[in-house]
């Protein structure tokens, strides 16, 4: 089979994502390759497709047990024979797996790097026809990488000891130029084809927040994101435990994960999260590298990580299915102190590199520029935009404030202190502190002493951080950095250059609905979606695999848009390949067919232009067409559906969306208001908030439309 035939048959996709086809073609030419592709870009397919095209066996070196299990489960579910070898196997399972490998039962074998060096394993490799060795998370080979693993440095020795050298390919999500060079050198890649697809994750909405209370912010955020799957990262085990307990007390379904827990507890909590038995994972960075869960809708960093590489990789665990997701970083100055402590106690030798990385992410948290641009520039890219309109800095109303006078005060103070001290002491002098240290140095006699006494010390520190982030001040040193002035500072002090700051009047956490880079730009049937999600959960339990491995959320949403009621139309759904169709197709087709018949829905066809996601068009305007027919032409829902050739359920959703977004519209003439009290009682009684459970408590005359209307009405009152 060709690569594109393998893609369609096993994975159910008609086209490759950006960069996949190019790197696969070079692998099939038996060239070594290095793929630098962001999390969610589909790196694994880049070696899984050639593995099926090549005659021999592919060995994948992967750093985490959880990654191997997810990948192998996913491959087996689409009909690709795969296995793994790691410490989670019992002795009998290990021996059986080795026996199966010798009998040629697998096309792809995942192995932990530590196992890769054993004489027994090398002997087995020389016995087998190894066509390719793929190294995942390749940045682990570099000491400049954020997840350095000494075992990765031994990989090239093992490969060179083989009697026949296979194609060697490596992949990573985040790599600076230094890390990229290390990967090529330390893995001994032979004249590799190097592909960097770009680090931009267009479906991720980036946000930096500095709330007065992280606890209150988190609770409000989770209230607005009910029934969504998310990860909350904390910097310490203690914080993980505190956040976990608090969320449990508020009734959320939560897992937790950190190195202080027993292996059994970590495994149980992780399985609960992966299998959708819990919706929220609270964890340290010990959790997540390689986690293949595709339906994570948000990642919150409760504490700032120590570097941008870690942050971008962890944030990138959101939205792996290509659907919209949010990445929120909660910043406080205490996080800087915590990270400095962790650097001092977690690293050996020279700490300069770690401190520089810490400074970079602090600048990210303080910049007023586009957050997406900042990240891309950090990884060596030149973005072709100044305003992405899809991050908190770009998506907020800004008030440009002239802070030239305050900036001059700060810069002048640093200069008068001979550029020899840190931000804390500079802030004390500007504040007019009477501390012994200020007096001992004689700084209370400076002209800048107390000239910013009207500000709090934290506000002065924030202004200093802003000037550092914008390049007016340079922070030099590691544990106790000092402040010096850059050339830009001289332009302010001596050339009357202006300094302005964009103050956020209101930071929007939610990206615009129906964004073109969001699969939700399609109008899908929410009621059917809930039915299919429940069905997916049942099927996942029967097959003992995570729900997202059955079908992704994106696949379900397409099913709820086009209503596939036969084999041919189901195969047109993205992510539905021949093997999954044979295994799960009948039960999903039957459920959709019953729903279509029950609601008298005209089945839609998937147009070819919808195969390419970049051609999806926004459906925003179509809602207002329905709105005007309802309000201006006084047509009812049934009449609008007939005029527009759409289903009544689609028109209902159009009008509900308009009502929810604040447009003036009287829907009570379409709502069964005589059951109003019963509906309110059912909503209050139902803890999960699921439509299906609410409806089961009510008479048959009450429709989903009725329930959704009153849910929106309640939310509007609460927000008011």
Image: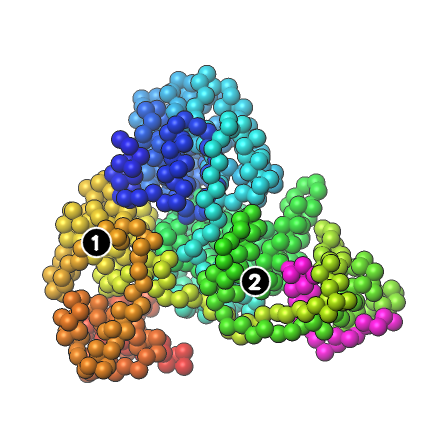
Mark 2 and mark 1 residues within 8 Å of each other at the beta carbon: no
Start and end of the magenta stretch?
444-472
The spot of residue 410 in percent (x, y) is 74, 68
Say left or right for 490 vs 192.
right
The spot of residue 432 in percent (x, y) is 79, 73
Residue lying at the far front in this picture: please name it.
Answer: 495
The spot of residue 607 in percent (x, y) is 22, 53
The residue shown at (28%, 44%) is: 13
Picture quarter containing residue 336?
bottom right
Between 691 and 450, the one lying in front of the other is: 450
The residue shown at (55%, 38%) is: 180
Between 222 and 697, the one lying in front of the other is: 222
Say left or right for 531 vs 357.
left
Q: Which residue is mark 1?
A: 606
Say left or right for 10 vs 391.
left
**Could you say which disc has been placed on residue 184 in the image?**
none
**Could you say which disc has been placed on residue 369 in the image?**
2
Residue 454 magenta? yes
Judged from the image, the secondary structure of the residue bearing numbered disc 2 is loop
The residue shown at (11%, 61%) is: 597
User: Please, is residue 662 above or below residue 553 in the view?
Assistant: below
Q: Is residue 714 visible?
A: no
Image quarter of the C terminus: bottom left
Badge 1: residue crowd in 10 Å (few <14, some 14–19, many ≥20): some
The residue shown at (23%, 81%) is: 631
């Amino acid at each position: 089979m060709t690569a594109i035939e393998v893609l369609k048959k096993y994975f159910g996709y008609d086209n490759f994502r950006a960069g996949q086809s190019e790197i696969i073609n070079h692998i099939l030419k038996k060239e070594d390759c290095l793929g630098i592709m962001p999390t969610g870009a589909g790196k694994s397919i880049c070696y899984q497709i050639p593995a099926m095209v090549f005659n021999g066996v592919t060995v994948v070196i992967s750093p985490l047990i959880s990654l191997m299990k997810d990948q192998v489960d996913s491959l087996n579910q689409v009909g690709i024979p795969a296995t793994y070898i790691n410490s989670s196997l019992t002795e009998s399972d290990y021996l059986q797996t080795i026996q199966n490998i010798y009998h040629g039962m697998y096309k792809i074998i995942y192995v932990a790097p530590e196992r890769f060096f054993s004489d027994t394993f090398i002997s087995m490799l020389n016995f087998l026809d190894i066509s390719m060795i793929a190294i995942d998370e390749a940045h682990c080979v570099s000491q400049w990488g954020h997840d350095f693993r000494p075992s990765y440095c031994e990989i090239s020795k093992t490969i060179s000891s083989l009697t026949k050298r296979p194609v060697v390919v490596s992949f990573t999500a985040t790599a600076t130029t230094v890390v990229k060079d290390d990967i090529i050198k330390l893995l001994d890649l032979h004249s590799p084809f190097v592909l960097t697809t770009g680090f931009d994750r267009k479906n991720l909405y980036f946000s930096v927040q500095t709330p007065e209370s992280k606890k209150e912010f988190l609770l409000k955020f989770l209230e607005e994101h009910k029934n969504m799957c998310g990860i909350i990262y904390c910097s310490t085990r203690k914080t993980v435990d505190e956040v976990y307990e608090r969320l449990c007390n508020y009734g959320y379904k939560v897992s937790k994960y950190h190195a202080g827990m027993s292996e059994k507890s970590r495994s149980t909590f992780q399985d609960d999260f992966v299998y959708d038995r819990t919706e929220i994972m609270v964890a340290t960075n010990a959790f997540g590298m390689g986690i293949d869960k595709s339906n994570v809708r948000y990642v919150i960093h409760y504490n700032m990580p120590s570097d941008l590489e870690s942050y971008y990789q962890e944030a990138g665990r959101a939205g792996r299915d290509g659907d919209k997701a949010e990445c929120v970083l909660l910043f406080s100055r205490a996080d800087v102190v915590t990270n400095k402590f962790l650097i001092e106690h977690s690293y050996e030798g020279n700490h300069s590199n770690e401190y520089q990385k810490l400074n970079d992410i602090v600048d990210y948290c303080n910049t007023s520029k586009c957050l997406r641009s900042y990240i891309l520039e950090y990884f060596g890219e030149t973005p072709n935009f100044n305003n992405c309109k899809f991050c908190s800095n770009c998506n907020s109303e800004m008030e440009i404030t002239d802070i030239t006078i305050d900036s001059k005060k700060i810069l002048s103070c640093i200069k008068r202190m001979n550029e020899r001290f840190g931000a804390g002491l500079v802030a004390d002098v500007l504040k007019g502190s009477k501390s012994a240290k200020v007096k001992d140095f004689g700084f209370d006699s400076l002209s800048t002493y107390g000239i910013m006494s009207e500000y709090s010390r934290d506000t002065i520190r924030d202004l200093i951080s802003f000037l550092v982030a914008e390049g007016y001040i340079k922070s030099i040193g590691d544990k106790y950095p000092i402040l010096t002035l850059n050339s830009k500072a001289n332009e302010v002090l001596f050339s009357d250059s202006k300094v302005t700051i964009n103050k956020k009047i209101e930071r929007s956490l939610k990206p615009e609905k129906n964004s073109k880079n969001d699969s939700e730009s399609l109008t899908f049937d929410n009621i059917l979606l809930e039915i299919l999600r429940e069905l997916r959960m049942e099927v996942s339990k029967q097959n003992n695999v995570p729900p997202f491995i059955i079908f992704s959320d994106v696949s379900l949403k397409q099913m709820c848009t086009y209503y596939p009621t036969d084999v041919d139309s189901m195969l047109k759904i993205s992510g539905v390949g021949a093997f999954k169709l044979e295994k799960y197709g009948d039960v999903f087709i039957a459920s959709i067919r019953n729903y279509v018949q029950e609601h008298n829905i005209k089945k839609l066809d998937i147009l070819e232009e919808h195969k390419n996601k970049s051609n999806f068009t926004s459906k925003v305007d179509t809602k207002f067409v329905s709105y005007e027919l309802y309000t201006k032409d006084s047509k009812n829902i049934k009449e609008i559906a007939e005029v527009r050739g759409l289903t009544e359920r689609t028109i209902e959703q159009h009008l509900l969306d308009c009502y929810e977004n604040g447009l003036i519209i009287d829907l009570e003439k379409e709502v069964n208001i005589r059951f109003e009290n019963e509906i309110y009682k059912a909503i209050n009684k139902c803890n999960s908030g699921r439509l299906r459970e609410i409806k089961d408590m009510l008479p048959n005359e009450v429709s989903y439309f009725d329930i959704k209307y009153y849910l929106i009405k309640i939310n509007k009152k609460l927000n008011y």
